[in-house]
Image: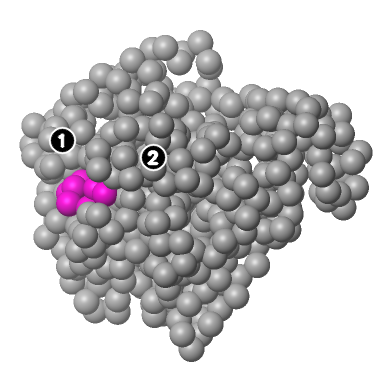
């Protein structure tokens, strides 16, 4: 169908063209359909379209190109910057594109990008297999993969993009391309860390790893500076099969915590040892020895079990910052404790992820994600309810991040909020940025795909 060159669209025509899979402002389900994980983004798109395959995606891209309306691409709707919905524009909602085809002999999977990490992991896990994503089941695999993918298997099997074999991509001119190391290798390089700047990813082909079970789960320890420093040291010394994500926070009244721990600072460590029970127990022992655990749920389990329950808390307002660190010594740990104790938010968290292992062995120039040698990824954030508290919470997050910052600038693009173009530049070293901008010029010279952590096309 050829759409008129105008800034308005005909909703009846759109419904006819997409078999009714369109939601408009007057529809009963509109508010739910435009809602994101982060509730503070209250944007009203002109239409939300749910395609079922690459051909329909190309038609939506063509509509955006011809009308000039902003185009938002939504996989799971977890964009920290709210890029999954466009004010007055078109939302390309991939939620009906959930096909997953396994090739058990070759250990590969083709997955449409409307799948969530939890749904994919549960399906392949039933075959004793896994691909590493992030740490939250409801996140869509589309945006997660395009930014890099740092999760529970990062030290054992690398980033998600290190296990990406090919992709199906709809470009700004409406072409449907299959990209890999041999077909459009420049584009394949760019989408491995460059985000949604180069097209709409409609399918990914992933490598599958045998992982019948893990030793993993939640270990909660007292949140002292000594424990924080010791946990990071234990994670760095652990075998590569073990990845750890430590959330340091004031304990909410969780039923499995002793009442005396409520309101006190805790370390909620999420551990995953990708291997058998006995070796996993040995790998976890140093973490348990840091202090008397307040709760210990680490046990042999399926890898998919780490992504349950799939339900997330509702986040209305959040102020967050992310960075890479070179080390967490006692002084850094004390800084974390001080800033968390000073928070006035309903929830304040510092997150530490120890990197290295398989991720660090991939050459920096091999993908657009270039932070291969950084040792620790840190994030700080607060969750609160009232928009009027935002200035104070943003100032707290800025101050906390400034107090932690060390080493060269750098940031993981998937954890960026709406922080301005200079912060986007920090996600890519200069040679990487220049190469991405040149590829952007070739494939999207008019910057149609701009609702993202944007890389403008080279002049």
Task: Residue 385 in the image: state x and y as whole percent.
Answer: 53, 22
Assign a secondary structure to mark 2. Answer: helix
Q: Can residue 326 be seen in the rendering of this structure?
A: yes
User: Where on the picture, by quarter, is residue 227?
Assistant: top left
Vertical arrangement, residue 145 with respect to residue 222, above or below: below
- Provide the residue span drawn in magenta: 370-377
Task: Residue 309 in the image: state x and y as whole percent.
Answer: 53, 55
Q: Residue furthest bottom?
A: 105
Q: Which residue is mark 1?
A: 408
Of callouts 2 and 1, the N-terminal one = 1
Task: Residue 72 in the image: state x and y as whole percent.
Answer: 62, 37
The span from disc 2 to disc 1 (Cα, nearest Å) is 22 Å
**Residue 373 part of the magenta segment:** yes
Q: Which residue is mark 2?
A: 437
Question: Do the residues under discs 2 and 1 have CB atoms within 8 angstroms?
Answer: no
Q: Can residue 255 be seen in the rendering of this structure?
A: no
Disc 1 crowd, CA 10 A, few/some/many (<14, 14-19, 20+): few
Residue appearing at x 91%, y 38% in the figure: 12
User: Is the C terminus in the top left, top right, bottom left or bottom right quadrant?
Assistant: top left
Disc 2 crowd, CA 10 A, few/some/many (<14, 14-19, 20+): many
Residue appearing at x 64%, y 36% in the figure: 71
User: Where on the picture, by quarter, is residue 367?
Assistant: bottom left
């Amino acid at each position: 169908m050829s759409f008129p060159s105008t800034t308005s669209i005909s909703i009846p025509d759109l419904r006819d063209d997409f078999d009714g899979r369109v939601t408009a402002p007057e529809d009963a389900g509109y508010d739910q359909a435009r809602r994101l994980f982060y509730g503070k983004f209250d944007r009203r798109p002109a239409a939300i379209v749910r395609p079922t395959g690459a051909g329909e995606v190309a038609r939506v891209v063509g509509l955006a190109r011809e009308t000039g309306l902003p185009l938002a691409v939504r996989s799971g709707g977890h964009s920290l910057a709210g890029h999954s919905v466009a004010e007055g524009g078109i939302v390309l909602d991939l939620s009906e594109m959930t096909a997953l085809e396994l090739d058990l002999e070759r250990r590969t999977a083709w997955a449409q990008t409307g799948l969530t990490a939890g749904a994919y992991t549960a399906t392949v896990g039933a075959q004793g297999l896994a691909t590493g994503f992030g740490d939250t089941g409801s996140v869509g695999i589309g945006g997660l993969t395009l930014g890099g993918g740092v999760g529970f298997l990062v030290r054992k099997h690398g980033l998600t993009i290190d296990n990406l074999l090919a992709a199906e991509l709809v470009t700004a001119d409406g072409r449907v391309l299959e990209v890999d190391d041999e077909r459009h290798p420049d584009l394949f390089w760019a989408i491995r860390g460059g985000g949604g700047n180069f097209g709409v990813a409609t399918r990914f082909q992933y490598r599958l790893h045998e992982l019948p079970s893990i030793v993993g789960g939640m270990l909660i320890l007292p949140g002292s500076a000594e424990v924080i420093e010791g946990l990071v040291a234990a994670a760095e010394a652990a075998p590569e099969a073990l990845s750890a994500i430590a959330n340091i926070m004031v304990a909410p009244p969780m039923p499995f915590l002793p009442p005396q721990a409520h309101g006190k600072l805790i370390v909620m460590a999420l551990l995953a040892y990708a291997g058998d029970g006995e070796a996993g127990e040995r790998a976890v022992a140093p973490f348990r020895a840091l202090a008397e655990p307040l709760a210990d749920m680490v046990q042999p389990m399926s890898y998919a079990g780490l992504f349950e329950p799939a339900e997330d808390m509702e986040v209305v307002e959040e102020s967050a910052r992310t960075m890479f660190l070179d080390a967490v010594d006692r002084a850094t740990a004390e800084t974390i404790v001080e800033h968390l104790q000073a928070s006035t938010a309903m929830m304040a968290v510092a997150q530490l992820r120890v990197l290295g292992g398989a991720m660090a062995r991939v050459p920096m120039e091999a993908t657009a994600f270039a932070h291969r040698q950084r040792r620790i990824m840190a994030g700080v954030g607060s969750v609160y309810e009232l928009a009027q508290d935002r200035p104070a919470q943003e100032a707290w997050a800025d101050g906390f991040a400034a107090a932690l910052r060390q080493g060269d600038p750098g940031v993981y693009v998937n954890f960026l909020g709406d922080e301005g173009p200079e912060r986007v530049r920090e996600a890519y070293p200069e040679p990487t940025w220049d190469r991405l901008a040149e590829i952007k010029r070739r494939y999207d010279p008019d910057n149609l795909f701009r609702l993202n952590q944007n890389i403008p096309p080279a002049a």
